[in-house]
Image (cartoon, helix red, strand yellow):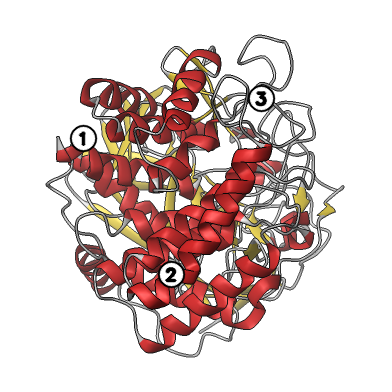
Amino acid sequence: MAEITSRRGAGQPRSRWASGFPPQVLREYALLADGERGILVGPRGDFAWMCAPRWDSPAIFSSLIGGGGLYAVCPVDERFVWGGHCSDGSLVWNSRWITASGIIECTEALAMPGDPDRAVVLRRIRAVQGPCAVRVVLDPRADFGRQGMSELRRDGSLWSARCGHHHLRWQSPPRMRRDSSGALQGVVRVEAGAHLDTVLEISARPLRTPPPDPGVSWSKTRDAWRHAVPELASTIAPRDARHAYTVLRGMTSSGGGMVAAATMSLPERAEQGRNYDYRYAWIRDQCYAGRAAAVSQPLPLLDEAIAFISARIMEDGPNLKPAYRADGGRVPDERRLNHLSGYPGGSDKVGNWVNRQFQLDSLGEVLLLLATAGEHDHLTAEHWSTVETTVSAIGKRWQDPDAGIWELDDQHWAHSRLTCVAGLKAISRITSASEGAPWNALADSILAQVSRDCLHSTGRWQRAPADPRVDAALLLPAVRGAVAPDDPRTTATLDAVAKELSSDGFVYRFRQDQRPLGEAEGAFLLCGFIMSLSEHQQGHPVQARSWFERNRSACGPPGLLTEEFSVSQRQLRGNLPQAFVHALLLESADRLAEH
């Protein structure tokens, strides 16, 4: 018989357990994802971040950025050593704690395939060596910590509740009870060699179907990952390349949109106001991922990128936005969440002002993606309409100032225009000479203009007509074919980036000011992998491998990379994980295998 235990919700005090799970350095967080949403798991077995039901929904677990909400499985013995790993080719995470009395593992995942409106969270506690005792705490707080559980009911070990707009159902361990702060908690003991399952459902709809069977859910999830992720054995780093593809797969929704990161508001630099919401699909980033998934063979992420981006192009044409929601909707305006304390050194924001920008290079990246698809015979007649619309948009807008790859002030950025040159040349190569002729002519006109206003006196490219600095992003158009690898402008730019923007095997975007590299901002891991591709294009395999190895090492045990890396402190900075960094890691691992 069901038991109603409480109807309390909003206004509950913060869980008394929350103080035991403070924010950790980013390299220690693991990612669970099912394409529709993600969870960050901390080293103490705490879910520090989860938005539901979708990537850009309000968070239900937000302790990472100073909000409420906690779902933890951790050893009762506070003296333990943490470790963990992802099961190969999946985002099934295995937390592992060695205590004074034994070894405990908690295997956890978001059930696959993901349902856009219902998350199923699987956790399996195992006593690997000796019996174990763990504390389990469930304290969801919807809307970034504002609303706790209400309408809580229990039927044996099956709990159901409301939490804000969410419907919850939890197949809990035995002997859970509700404490004064509203959390369900208890100590669970597992005999040596045995395991115990818990399943949490978070749904936008009432849960009317029977609860899922844990064993069946685990089997389906492992099978889904097995079919979703290729071996990638021919790359120079199969394990890391495969994990990069897995991360990109986990961040790509059923509608094809790939979010740039799973999180928001994690600071790129402490107390500098550089905290952003990256839970949206950036056109550029998804083009990078689609191309990376097709270096050797066309993998499914290529077709998903084409489908999502083609729809945006056909809807918006020359008014293409730099980013969209994962379902194709508009990115909301940026606003602050003043009731949260933020990740240490940062403040909390939702939405993104990118929705008001124009980024010309995105149009060039779209053509590069479509050209890659064409090389693999993956372009339909409908996609050729996308090609024509994109070429027309470039023709209309290439002389307009834009915000550029780094989303700064509107200027005539060299990188943006050169990327369009590369895209036009690439798409021209896979069509007839007569159809490609005007596209090549447009590319030549753009290149001539960039050569007039953005060629530095030393022979390298410079950032913009009024900005003579070198920029690591200027390496990428040459890699993509805007100009030849042996063009003096290509080699001079590569030399300048290596001399002026690199340090200790890492690469910075550009010099912010006269301070030493690293004082103004962290190294950009994306730029390190671009450097690797550039050296590879020049026929320098040793240098290419060196840049690759150095930059892929900038992660913790979960193998996740952010946008920036503090070289001196060896710490990740910014939102986690950053999709386009994983995309360039994947591409580099595949291309460098050519040598």
- The percent coordinates of residue 521 (x first, y second) are 65, 23
- The percent coordinates of residue 159 (x first, y second) are 52, 72
Counting residues from the N terminus, which is met first, the one under dot 1 or under dot 3? 1
Q: Residue 469 shows which numbered tag? A: 3
Could you tell me if residue 15 is visible in this image?
Answer: yes
Local secondary structure at mark 3 = loop
Q: Residue 437 shows which numbered tag? A: 2
**Three-letter amino acid code of the residue under disc 3:** Arg
Could you tell me if residue 136 is visible in this image?
Answer: no
Q: Choose mark 1 or mark 2, whichever is in front.
A: 2
What's the CA distance linking mark 2 and mark 3? 34 Å
Residue 397 appears left or right of 378: right
Quarter of the C terminus within the rendering: top left
**Three-letter amino acid code of the residue under disc 2:** Ala
Residue 572 appears left or right of 220: right
What's the CA distance linking mark 1 and mark 3? 61 Å
Few, some or many residues within 10 Å of mark 1 (<14, 14–19, 20+):
some
Q: Residue at x 50, y 90 (%)?
A: 208
Few, some or many residues within 10 Å of mark 3 (<14, 14–19, 20+):
some
Q: Would you say the residues marked 1 and 3 are in contact, meaning their CB atoms lie under 8 Å apart?
A: no
Q: Choose mark 1 or mark 3, whichever is in front.
A: 3
Q: Choose mark 2 or mark 3, whichever is in front.
A: 2
In this view, the residue in front, 110 or 539, is 539
In this view, the residue in front, 353 or 490, is 490
Local secondary structure at mark 1 = loop
**Three-letter amino acid code of the residue under disc 1:** Gly
What's the CA distance linking mark 1 and mark 2? 72 Å
Residue under pointer 1: 130
Few, some or many residues within 10 Å of mark 2 (<14, 14–19, 20+):
some
Q: Residue at x 15, y 54 (%)?
A: 231
Q: Residue at x 65, y 36 (%)?
A: 454
